[in-house]
Amino acid sequence: MVACLSHVSFDKFVREHWDQNQSIVPFLKTFGTKPQEESLQHQKSRHDAIRDRDHNISYFHKSTIVQRRHNQVEALQNDEGT
């Protein structure tokens, strides 16, 4: 849904600005996209979010592996250096 349609004072705005001698459909179309376009935009945003999440997970796992290797103790030395 277009954000302005869910605004608390949208109902009041429509009553004040809509010419009731005309159809309300063209008036409402001035506020946003068609439902089909909204659905397509929603699907595309979900696809992008899933794709980005996959990239983020991959990046996160790679960075933790690098950090784990960096933190790994390879050898211990005593005061004499052996």
Image: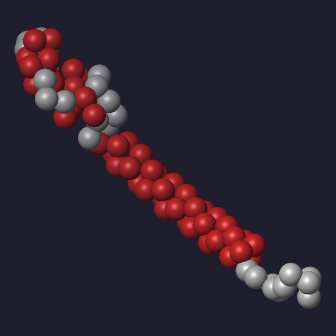
- Quadrant for residue 62, please give it: bottom right
Residue 20 at x, y = what percent? Answer: 7, 14
Of residue 46 and residue 62, the one placed in the foreground of this image is 62
Up the image or down, 2 lies above or below 41; here it is above
Residue 5 at x, y = what percent? Answer: 21, 32
Q: Residue at x 86, y 81 (%)?
A: 79
Residue 41: tell me if it is visible. Answer: yes
Q: Residue at x 43, y 56 (%)?
A: 46
Up the image or down, 66 lies above or below 25; here it is below
Of residue 65 and residue 8, the one placed in the foreground of this image is 65
Of residue 78 and residue 74, the one placed in the foreground of this image is 78
Of residue 59 and residue 76, the one placed in the foreground of this image is 76
Question: In the image, is 1 to the left or to the right of 55?
Answer: left
Question: In the image, is 42 to the left or to the right of 24?
Answer: right
Up the image or down, 63 lies above or below 39; here it is below
- Quadrant for residue 10, please give it: top left
Question: In the image, is 52 to the left or to the right of 71?
Answer: left
Circle count? 0
